[in-house]
Amino acid sequence: MNYKEFSREQRDAELGNLWSEYNGIKEKGLKLNMARGVPSPEQLALSLGMLDILHGDDCRAEDGTDCRNYGVMDGIPECKRLMAQVMGVTPEMVMVGGNSSLNMMFDTIACFMNHPVLPGHPAWALVPDRKFLCPVPGYDRHFGVTEYFGFEMIPVPMDENGPDMDMVEELVKDPAVKGMWCVPKYSNPSGISYSDEVVRRIAALKPAAEDFRLMWDNAYCIHDLFDDHDEILNIFEECEKTGNIDMPIEFCSTSKITFPGSGVAAMAASENNMKVIKEKYKYQNIGFDKLNMLRHVRFFGDFEGMKAHMKKHAEILRPRFDIVLDKLSTRLEEYGVVSYNRPRGGYFVCVDVYDGTAKRVVALCKEAGVNLTGAGATYPYGNDPHDSNIRIAPSFPSLEDLSSAMDVFCICARIAALEKMNEQGLA
């Protein structure tokens, strides 16, 4: 039943039926949101016990630090140890921050803009044609950071193994290329995890810019949907083998583990990188929220407790992903106008609709009461050259609302595809 095999008359008839169905949906006055990866109320409820876990004067860290007071710029020892286990590094490499890993990424780029990453090299702000590599489809907020700081962003296509490494290896020969964004596990939005070969090739890069840095955003490092989950190589271990230990800077947070608005973020870096970064933070901050760090450690107990907590999240999320994938399979796939991933973790389903129709699909969905991430958001400057990629975030709606939203999405994708085929004059 591929639409490309339809005659013009068949497509017109199909469009008429779909418009009738679409107009019926509009009359329902839906208000459904699949725009961002926001945890559902059921997920937030999993961490409510954290709110009253501290009692009276029992607010001291294991080294005696009074967490109610000033001080300890890089985090209390037990929280550094926990976040080190999450990232697979030693506690000495870790700095624990506030609630937002994106904030720490922004601050890191800002730091390197104003202070040399390496002695004898100019701060990035003094490089007029500075560039950053952006695997696509990717995370819009990453792109927003490097756009804000005036980098030329170079899209690098992704496949099922990760970024196109032939292209990356060629691009880093340009000394103006200062870094690359990476979401190595359950990448946002494609859901793919970097293969061992890709991680090894990234670790073995020989950039012309000695101050080239990997922004290794391991946001979904323990966000598995299944017990037989994806595993990625440890970037620091691989970079140590190749003499590139200063290249990666890793980030993570508990934003989708506990409370997005009041989680704990952390970063890991080599001694050389951390020296530069902490030089900035000592002027910027007298100490992040140590009570929140202490709450998190006492709530989880240890890393095993955190992983057990994530299994509860998976139980809530799996049915939502199942709904999205089932709707795409049964209500859209047979028409030959969609391709999509089947993620094993993370927070998104990445959908490619018929070329040239993503903006139209998003607009039709919005008119029918379903809010999606803007078309093009998964590419630098919002420029998807195929106008096809759409990120679906299934976590927040109820199961019933999600099912309704996906019905709307499938109808809109079919309408947009048929319109585009007629516009193209297909026989």
Image (tube, rainbow, N blue to C red):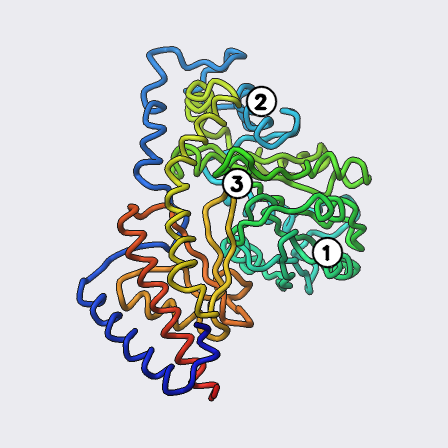
* Foreground residue among 78 and 414: 414
Q: Residue furthest front?
A: 1
Does residue 309 appear to the left or right of 85 in the view shown?
left
Which image quarter holds the N terminus?
bottom left
Residue ID for mark 1:
165
- Name the residue located 71 percent from the left edge and 32 percent from the top edge: 271
Gap in Å between the C-alphas at discs 1 and 3? 22 Å
Please determine whether, in this image, residue 8 is positioned above or below residue 377. below
- Which tag, 1 or 3, sits closer to the chain's start? 1
Does residue 39 appear to the left or right of 202 in the view shown?
left
| Amino acid type shown at disc 2 | Arg
Gap in Å between the C-alphas at discs 3 and 2? 19 Å
Q: Residue 14: percent from the left, percent from the top?
A: 33, 78
Q: Residue 118: percent from the left, percent from the top?
A: 75, 44
Q: Residue 112: percent from the left, percent from the top?
A: 65, 48
Where is residue 3, by image quadrant?
A: bottom left
Where is residue 59, by image quadrant?
A: top left
Gap in Å between the C-alphas at discs 2 and 1? 33 Å
* Comparing labels 3 and 2, the label whose residue is closer to the camera: 3
Q: Secondary structure at mark 3?
A: loop
Does residue 111 appear to the left or right of 14 in the view shown?
right
Q: Residues within 10 Å of mark 2 (few under 14, many from 20)?
A: many
Q: Secondary structure at mark 1?
A: helix
Residue ID for mark 3:
220
- Name the residue located 69 percent from the left edge and 65 percent from the top edge: 129
Does residue 341 appear to the left or right of 57 in the view shown?
right
Please determine whether, in this image, residue 304 is positioned above or below residue 347. above
- Which tag, 3 or 2, sits closer to the chain's start? 2
* Foreground residue among 375 and 10: 10
Residue ID for mark 2:
81
| Amino acid type shown at disc 3 | Tyr
Where is residue 208, by image quadrant?
A: bottom right
